[in-house]
Amino acid sequence: MPPSASRFVLPPEPVLRAREKLVLDHFHDEVRQDWDATLATFPHPHYELIAQMTVHDGDREVRDYYADTRTAFPDQDHEIIALRHSIDAVIVEFWLLGTHRGPLGAIPPTGSRHRTRMTAYFVFDEAENLVTERIYFDQLTILRQLIGGLNPRSPRGLLKLGRVLLGAVRVSGGAPDPRLSRTVPPALDD
């Protein structure tokens, strides 16, 4: 939010329309897996995954994030539920969908589909540059769906379930990124 702007006044309609177009283009380019076009929506790509408390900052890290998630879910897609505007962000509620065809970090592929409700904040700076995509979701919702198609009564299904759960423990053991855990309360005196 620009330093002189009030947190109670939205930017003018042309600004909101331009932000919305950029965000919708960003979503469209992600589904097409056109990473150059997707990254062009940022002056400096920056993703924050709140559920995992991880940050992907800069072109290389974000491209690696895209590669990892599309290896795991090559058919990843989304369904937008709602789009809202705030003083400094476009907020998008959506369903993320995909079939677990490849490894997701240490979690082996299950072949199961997931449909997970998420919220993403596309945050803009005072020059109207997209500076952050901050994504909120429940990791257990995804994990539950990924293991839901396994048959724990068969030796093969039970073995796969054990590998998935072990992989989930491995990927959840990292320390939170301090850029996400060291927060400062806003000044609300006005």
Image (tube, grey):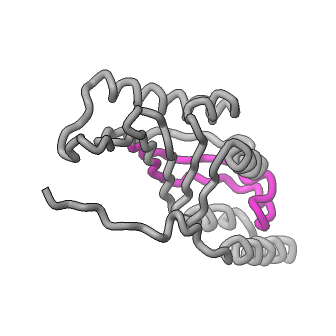
120 or 129: which is nearer to us? 129
Question: From this viewpoint, is residue 73 visible?
Answer: no
Magenta stretch: includes residue 119: yes
The residue that appears at 37% across and 67% down in the rendered structure is 184
The residue that appears at 49% across and 52% down in the rendered structure is 134
Magenta stretch: includes residue 103: yes
51 or 139: which is nearer to us? 51
Q: Is residue 159 above or below residue 57?
A: below
Q: Which residues are magenta?
A: 91-120
The residue that appears at 79% across and 67% down in the rendered structure is 106
User: x%, y% of residue 56?
Assistant: 64, 53
The residue that appears at 33% across and 40% down in the rendered structure is 84
The quadrant of the rendering that contains the C terminus is bottom left
The quadrant of the rendering that contains the N terminus is top left
Judged left or right of residue 157, residue 85 is left
User: x%, y% of residue 7?
Assistant: 22, 47
Q: Quadrant of residue 186?
A: bottom left
Judged left or right of residue 157, residue 69 is left
User: x%, y% of residue 103?
Assistant: 80, 58
Residue extending farthest top:
14
